[in-house]
Image: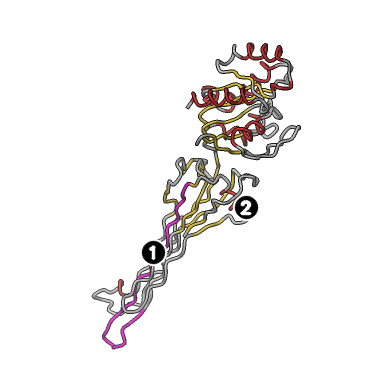
């Protein structure tokens, strides 16, 4: 038995953090039974084992949305034992599909219980409870007709926080309204919403370019690492990105300040983010003078070796970007 839906649209609002209760199935009860003949003795069978609950990693990043209306999941209970020493049927296992990149965190301790880092990875989360013993199991020399039985044991139960960190090859970062979404649309045909105002992107957009995953991370602002703007809820998505595509608008009056603002927030959140390979992209190069673009490229090359001016309306500049990206992977 499983819960999955790989046809979910990536345009749906992405839920990337939820609290969920998972339980293994309850063990089935043993039964009290005696044979038809007076001296047949006890023949009550044991209960079946409760089903196990597994989690399995899927490429569908919207799968945490399934917990928006239901937050408790349990595998099937084991069945009661029967007469004539018949053991009850085991409960059916349950497989919960989660997005690859999901961390399962203990709600009380804050410790990570499991991580799902590869598509198809399947792990046992909650074992089912053992079935109870029927009265046949309680026979003894001093008690030939026991009426004892067990009800079965509870399955494991865990209250967990599911926290998704996107796993992508390239992550587009930058201040709000610098053209990241338009760029990912042009590179991958992701068809994400774009508009000329900040915070159009309220959840990460994904696209695929030559078999590699691109993630458009919502715009960062000064103080994001402390929760301002869209805050740290999206900074975490950069942690598992392999290569940073740092976008800076050609409309900026101070490209170095814009660059350092984003880098500073990344560093405050996690020093390792600033150690990742980086390509700096000056976006919207078609709406600014060549002289200003040249000066901006020169300034930014004092901060990063890979700097490129790009316009989604300039085929040559897009091809140069694609060549540079290919060289990184």
What whole-number distance in Å separates the C-alpha atoms at marks 2 and 1? 30 Å
Structure colour scheme: secondary structure
The magenta region covers 33-57
Residue 102 image position (x, y, % from top left): 51, 43
The residue indicated by pointer 1 is 49
Q: Is residue 142 above or below residue 49?
A: below
Question: Which of these two is toward me, 256 or 82?
Answer: 256
Q: Is residue 81 above or below residue 258?
A: below
Instruction: Tell me which corner region of the image, top left, top right, bottom left or bottom right, holds residue 257.
Output: top right
Instruction: Tell me which corner region of the image, top left, top right, bottom left or bottom right, holds residue 40.
Output: bottom left
Q: Is residue 296 left or right of residue 111?
A: right
Farthest right residue? 197
The residue indicated by pointer 2 is 68
Farthest bottom residue? 37
Q: Main secondary structure of the magenta part?
A: loop
Earlier-in-chain disc, 2 versus 1:
1
């Amino acid at each position: 038995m499983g819960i999955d839906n790989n046809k979910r649209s990536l345009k749906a609002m992405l839920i990337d953090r939820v609290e969920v209760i998972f339980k293994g199935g309850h063990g089935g009860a043993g039964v009290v039974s005696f044979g038809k003949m007076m001296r047949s003795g006890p023949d009550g069978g044991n209960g079946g084992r409760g089903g196990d609950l597994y989690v399995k990693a899927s490429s569908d990043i919207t799968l945490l949305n399934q917990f928006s209306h239901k937050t408790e999941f349990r595998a099937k209970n084991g069945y009661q034992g029967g007469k004539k020493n018949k053991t009850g049927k085991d409960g059916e296992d349950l497989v919960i599909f989660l997005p690859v990149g999901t961390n399962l965190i203990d709600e009380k301790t804050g410790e990570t219980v499991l991580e799902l880092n590869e598509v198809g990875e399947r792990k046992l989360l909650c074992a089912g409870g053992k079935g109870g013993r029927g009265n046949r199991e309680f026979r003894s020399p001093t008690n030939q007709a026991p009426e004892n039985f067990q009800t079965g044991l509870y399955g494991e139960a865990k209250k967990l926080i599911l926290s998704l960190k996107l796993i992508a090859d390239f992550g587009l970062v930058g201040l709000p309204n610098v053209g990241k979404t338009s760029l990912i649309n042009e590179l991958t045909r992701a068809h994400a919403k774009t508009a000329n105002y900040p915070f159009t992107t309220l959840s990460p957009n994904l696209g695929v370019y030559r078999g590699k995953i691109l993630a458009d991370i919502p715009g960062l602002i000064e103080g994001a690492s402390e929760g301002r703007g869209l805050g740290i809820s999206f900074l975490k998505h950069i942690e598992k990105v392999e290569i940073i595509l740092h976008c800076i608008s050609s409309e900026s009056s101070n490209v170095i300040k814009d660059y350092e603002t984003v880098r500073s927030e990344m560093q405050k959140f996690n020093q390792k983010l600033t150690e990742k390979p980086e390509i700096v992209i000056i976006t919207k190069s078609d709406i600014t003078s060549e002289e200003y673009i040249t000066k901006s490229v020169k300034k930014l090359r004092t901060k990063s070796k890979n700097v490129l001016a790009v316009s989604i309306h300039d085929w040559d500049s897009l091809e140069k970007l694609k060549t540079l990206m290919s060289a990184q992977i």
